[in-house]
Amino acid sequence: MTSSNPDYAFLHKLADAADAKTMQHFRSGYEVDNKLDAGFDPVTIADRSAEEAIRAVLEAERPDHGIIGEEYGRTRDDAENVWVLDPVDGTRSFICGTPLWGTLIGLRTNGKASQGIMSQPYNSERFWGNCEEAFMTGPLGERTLKTRSCASLSEAIITTTEPSLFNETERPVWDAICAEARLTRYSTDCYGYAMVAAAGFDAVIETGMNTYDILALIPIIEGAGGFVTNWTGGNAADGGQVLATGDKRLHDELLTKLASVAV
């Protein structure tokens, strides 16, 4: 299905490099550092070593491409092609030993997300796409991804990583959306977006996102037939307020509900 596509082969090569590092440390002893003076933003050796491994492959095989990584910043980020890396998206889950984390590797071409992969090596799962098609592989084999039909919020299963993401203006809107939705789940990080593509969730609503939190996921969800925008309906590649859905009807309904707090 996908083995003949050299772009996909390279995505998997990058994911292989990261997986070798993250799985050395998952559910093992390591120090957890905090990036913040006030609050808690954890980082571990798994985050750092996985990004180093991805960067080493890119520098060797795509030396003219740029890189934006959560742990080591920006290199040649004005290039036509820029790789956007989150070596462990969901570090809080990682340090708790729960497998709701993943490595995000995305390619931005002329400012837009063009390819992406999410790797969850503990579950032996990967999700990848190019905005026109998307696939996953895991214990049940490889398959083409297709989002679920969902005509309205009252039928929808929705998620966000945690309600504390929302500021005091945004939170009441989120609460009202939850009250109308069929079911709401939390603590999914990048896995929630992958499950939109895989027809598990119908929507993810988040705010305060960085480009490395979302860019790799856009080609997967869009390739599966879904939609990813900011809350004004624009390009979500730079992060900020993000809405991802599997059905255009639900997307439009949620954009209307979010419009009052969209920036």
Image: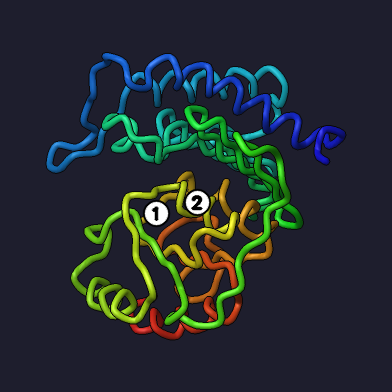
Above or below, comparing residue 161 to residue 52 in the picture: below
Q: Are marks 1 and 2 in contact (CB under 8 Å)?
A: yes
Above or below, comparing residue 222 to residue 61 in the picture: below
Residue 58, percent from left and from top: 64, 24
First in sequence, mark 1 or 2: give its number.
Answer: 1
Query: What is the three-letter code of the residue carrying label 1?
Result: Met
Question: Which of the labelled discs sits on residue 214, or is there none?
Answer: 2
Above or below, comparing residue 64 to residue 259 in the picture: above
Distance Cα–Cα, label 1 vs label 2: 7 Å
Residue 185, percent from left and from top: 34, 59
Question: If the image is split into quadrants, where does the N terminus sit?
Answer: top right
Q: Residue at x 41, y 60 (%)?
A: 240
Question: If the image is split into quadrants, where does the C terminus sit?
Answer: bottom left
Give residue 184's quadrant in the image.
bottom left
Within 10 Å of disc 1 (Cα), the crowding (few <14, some 14-19, many 20+) is: some
Query: What is the three-letter code of the residue carrying label 2?
Result: Ile
Number of disc labels: 2
Question: Which of the labelled discs sits on residue 209, or is there none?
Answer: 1
Q: Residue at x 48, y 17 (%)?
A: 21
Residue 25, percent from left and from top: 38, 17
